[in-house]
Image (cartoon, rainbow, N blue to C red):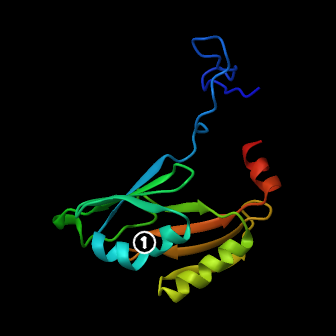
Amino acid sequence: MTETLTAQTGEPDTGASGQNAAPGPLLGTMNHIGITVSDLADSTERFYAPLLRFLGYEVIHQTAEMSVWLAASGCAVNLWQAWPEHAGRKPERYAPGFHHFAFNADSRETVDRCHDFLRGQGIEILDPPAEYDYEPGYYALFFADPDGMKFELVHLPPPASASIVA
């Protein structure tokens, strides 16, 4: 029998019927991220479309002002065109705001393949694939979009992933 826990009590959520509720998205996992870029068309063509397609996302909505990319998992990336008065502003990683965003990878090989793919696309690599001491088995690649925003593709083996939430 599958059950979910309520966020407030940690008790099984039986819902109004008294039956255990069907599992929904895990509390706290990403639903979507909205990213504003200086030039939506250029950033999409040069960076986001190749990366997001590599990661299994598909564009499901697109206008001149924004686009929505959806993965099979239900996670979404929303891209927004910056207003003209803000389009030239560069992000500051250590100022309040967006520092970086990490996508999960299913294996180290996927991280390595992504690295080769991004290099072939001319995407700026900040740090090539390597093992980092953040958690046991943490293997990641860091790269930047055309505005300089930092992204990561990380693989954590299941025991390491479990230690983070334990």
Q: Residue 19: x, y in percent? A: 67, 15
Which residue is at 37% across, 67% downward? 91
Relative placement, left or right, of 147 versus 165 is left
Q: Is residue 153 above or below residue 4?
A: below
Which residue is nearer to you in this view: 119 or 68? 68
Q: Is residue 144 above or below residue 27?
A: below
Which residue is at 65% across, 79% downward? 113
Q: Quadrant of the C terminus?
A: top right
Q: Residue 63: x, y in percent? A: 25, 61
Specify few, some or many for label 1: CA neighbours under 10 Å numbering under 14, 14-19, or 20 or more. Answer: some
Relative placement, left or right, of 19 versus 46 is right
Relative placement, left or right, of 71 versus 64 is right
Residue 105 is drawn in which quadrant? bottom right
Q: Residue 132: x, y in percent? A: 72, 69
Q: Residue 17: x, y in percent? A: 60, 11
Q: Quadrant of the N terminus?
A: top right
Q: Amino acid at mark 1?
A: Ala
Which residue is at 64% across, 20% downward? 13
Helix, strand or loop at label 1? It is helix
Which residue is nearer to you in this view: 121 or 99? 121
For the question of whether residue 131 can be seen, the reply is: no
How many discs mark residues in the rendered view? 1
Which residue is nearer to you in this view: 6 or 99? 6
Q: Which residue is mark 1?
A: 49
